[in-house]
Image (cartoon, rainbow, N blue to C red):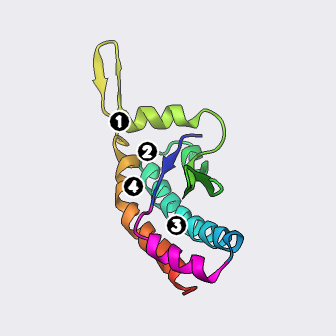
Amino acid sequence: MTEVTVKFKGVDEVINKLAEKFSPAKLNRIENDALRVAGRRVAVELKNAVASYRDTGQTVLQVSVGNPHSRGGVRTIKIGWHTGSRWRLVHLNELGYTRFGKTYHPRGMGKVQGAFDSSRGPAKALEEAELRKLL
C-alpha cells in the first residue's frame, strides 16, 4: 500500500491532559477515533486530487484509510491505495516519466503532494477539535 504518513505534534498538550483523565487503553481508543476522522478528511482531499486524471475511476475508488497504529511511540494512520498495483500508476502520474528520451508531464503531476500539503493543517485542526471535545 502506498502510504502518506501524517504526524500531528500540536496535540501533545491535549493528549497529556487527556492522559490525566483516562486510562491508557481508553486514551488509545480516543486517539484512534480522532485519527480516523482526520484520516477520512485527508482521504477525501486525496480523492478530489486524483479525480483530475481519472480514466476508469479505480484510482479514486481505491483510496483507503488504514487503521491507526503506533510507530515509534507516535500514533499514525496510513492513507493510500489498498488493492492491486494502483500505486505504480499513481507514481507515474505524480512524478512524470521519461520514455525514449522524451519527458512526459502528466496532468496529475504533483496533485497527490499538493493534496497532502493543503489538507495537513485542516486535518490537524480537526483532530485537535475531536480531542478537545473530551476535555
Residue at the (45%, 75%) spot, across then down: 13
Q: Which image quadrant: the N terminus?
A: top right
Q: Tell me the CA gap for discs 4 and 1.
A: 16 Å
Tell me which label, 4 or 2, sits earlier in the chain.
Answer: 2
Q: Where residue 61 sits in the image (x, y, percent)?
A: 60, 51
Q: Going 63% across and 53% down the picture, which residue do you hit? A: 66
Residue 106 position within the rendered picture, expressed as x and y whole percent measured from the top left: 35, 36
SS for dot 1: loop
Q: Quadrant of residue 97?
A: top left
Q: Earlier in the sequence, mark 3 or mark 4?
A: 3
Marks 4/2: CA–CA distance: 14 Å
Judge by depth and name the residue closer to the eye, 88 or 79: 79
Position of the C terminus, as image quadrant, is bottom right
Residue drawn at the location 54% of the way across and 40% of the way down: 2
Contact (Cβ within 8 Å) of mark 2 with mark 3: no
Q: Earlier in the sequence, mark 2 or mark 3?
A: 3
